[in-house]
């Protein structure tokens, strides 16, 4: 198997706001929104990668409590034609207000359930957000979805 045959391995974050909406980002030069996150540096654990990437891309700090693994999912990559991406997804909480930084051109808070209202990467639309919705479960009385 050549390097171009193996999937691009990333770690991704599902961040929900108080209204149960999920944060997605769009990189410069792309028209598709993805989960925030990125590739691991050598020796990094998944949550170390997310802490670094979320700080670089959005200026927020990963809260060490409450991180929940959603699973590992594979799908067609949107920003690298002919490649697949394998995302290890985590539902996490952050401190601070996410802001566009580094290679991020735009961020959006979208509904966890379709319709999402933006062009969303297959990895997010088909795998990560459905897994996050199952974890979130139905809202209780007076409780917004996803809390």
Image: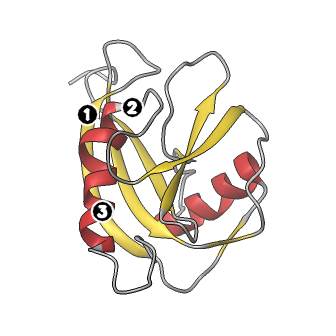
- The numbered mark, 3 or 1, whose residue comes first in the sequence reads 1
Please name the residue that numbered disc 3 is placed on: 133
Residue appearing at x 57%, y 60% in the figure: 50
The residue lying toward the viewer, choosing from 118 and 125, is: 118
The residue lying toward the viewer, choosing from 112 and 9, is: 112
Q: 10 Å neighbourhood of mark 2: few (<14), some, or many (≥20)?
A: many
Tell me residue 30's x, y (percent): 57, 19
Foreground disc of the pair 2, 3: 3
Tell me residue 16's x, y (percent): 52, 64
The residue lying toward the viewer, choosing from 39 and 3, is: 39
The coloring applied to the image is secondary structure
Please name the residue that numbered disc 2 is placed on: 121
Q: Quadrant of residue 49?
A: bottom right
- The numbered mark, 1 or 2, whose residue comes first in the sequence reads 1
Q: Secondary structure at mark 2?
A: loop
Q: Is residue 59 above or below residue 101?
A: below
**Cα separation between marks 1 and 2:** 9 Å
Query: Looking at the rendered structure, which numbered label has been put on residue 75?
Result: 1
Foreground disc of the pair 1, 2: 2
- The numbered mark, 2 or 3, whose residue comes first in the sequence reads 2
Q: Quadrant of residue 83?
A: top left
């Amino acid at each position: 198997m050549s390097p171009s045959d193996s999937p691009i391995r990333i770690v991704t974050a599902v961040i929900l706001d108080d209204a149960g909406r999920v944060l997605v980002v769009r990189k410069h030069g792309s028209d598709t929104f993805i989960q925030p996150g990125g590739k691991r540096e050598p020796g990094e654990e998944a949550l170390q990668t997310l802490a670094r990437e979320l700080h670089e891309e959005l200026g927020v700090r990963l809260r060490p409590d409450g991180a929940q693994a959603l699973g590992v999912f594979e799908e067609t990559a949107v920003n690298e034609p002919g490649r697949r991406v394998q995302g290890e997804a985590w539902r996490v909480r952050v401190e601070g207000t996410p802001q566009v930084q580094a290679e991020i051109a735009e961020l959006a808070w979208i509904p966890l359930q379709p319709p999402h209202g933006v062009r969303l990467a297959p990895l997010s639309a088909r795998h990560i957000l459905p897994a996050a919705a199952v974890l979130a479960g139905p809202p209780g009385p007076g409780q917004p979805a996803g809390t």
